[in-house]
Image (cartoon, rainbow, N blue to C red):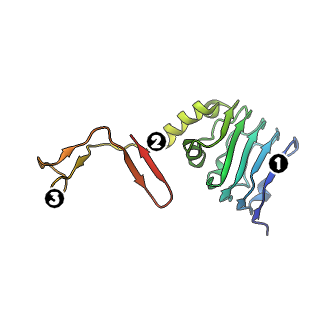
Amino acid sequence: SLKSIGGLSLSNNPELIDISLLNKITSLNKGLTIYNTKNLNSLSGLNNIKSIGGRLDIGGNKGLSSINELSNADFTALTYLGITSNPILALCQELNICNYLFSGRENYIAGNSSGCLNYETLIESCNTAWKNTITGNIKIDIDGNGCGNQTNDLPMKQNIVRVTNATDNYTTY
């Protein structure tokens, strides 16, 4: 069965209503285009995609309200993200999309609904959905005995905190 293909274009097909048979695809190395498919209401069938490279263009889809089926895809090799003119698409603040936008790579977001209306709205939605909050006090452990109520420990203000996991670095101020 077909698992990895170069790219996939679902374009200019107003009769397309179901793509569930694409559920065996796990990798799209050269992009995904979903454009002008007015009767496609769901991306169900693309939920097993683990990576997308190249361009991701989703535009002109009158019936599409969510793209959460792409939430499992790694966008490390993505070079462009375009989400445009999907009038009822309000849910596109998936973590992979937000991380792509936070990285500052090329994108164009416009003409969608509410939480995905444009770049600014989507960034705000991403911040609301995925914002990590660190609370508490940060101190420098001067004497090496652990931070607590020791008078030698110095409080720090306006810090850069970098949290690192196996694949990503996150910095906050």
Label 2 near label 3: C-beta < 8 Å? no
Label 1 packing within 10 angstroms: few (<14), some (14-19), many (20+): some
Q: Could you tell me the amino acid type at mark 1?
A: Leu
User: Residue 125, located in which quarter of the rendered image?
Assistant: top right
Toward the bottom, the furthest residue is: 1
Q: Are marks 3 and 1 in contact (CB under 8 Å)?
A: no
* Disc 2 crowd, CA 10 A, few/some/many (<14, 14-19, 20+): few
Label tally: 3
Q: Position of residue 162 (x, y in %)?
A: 39, 50
Q: Is residue 68 left or right of residue 20?
A: left
SS for dot 3: loop
Q: Which residue is mark 2?
A: 131
Precedes in sequence: disc 1 or disc 2:
1
Query: In the image shown, does 31 or 71 lie closer to the viewer?
Result: 31
User: Which of label 3 and label 1 is nearer to you?
Assistant: 3
Which numbered disc covers residue 10?
A: 1
Kindly state the secondary structure of the residue where label 1 is placed. Answer: strand
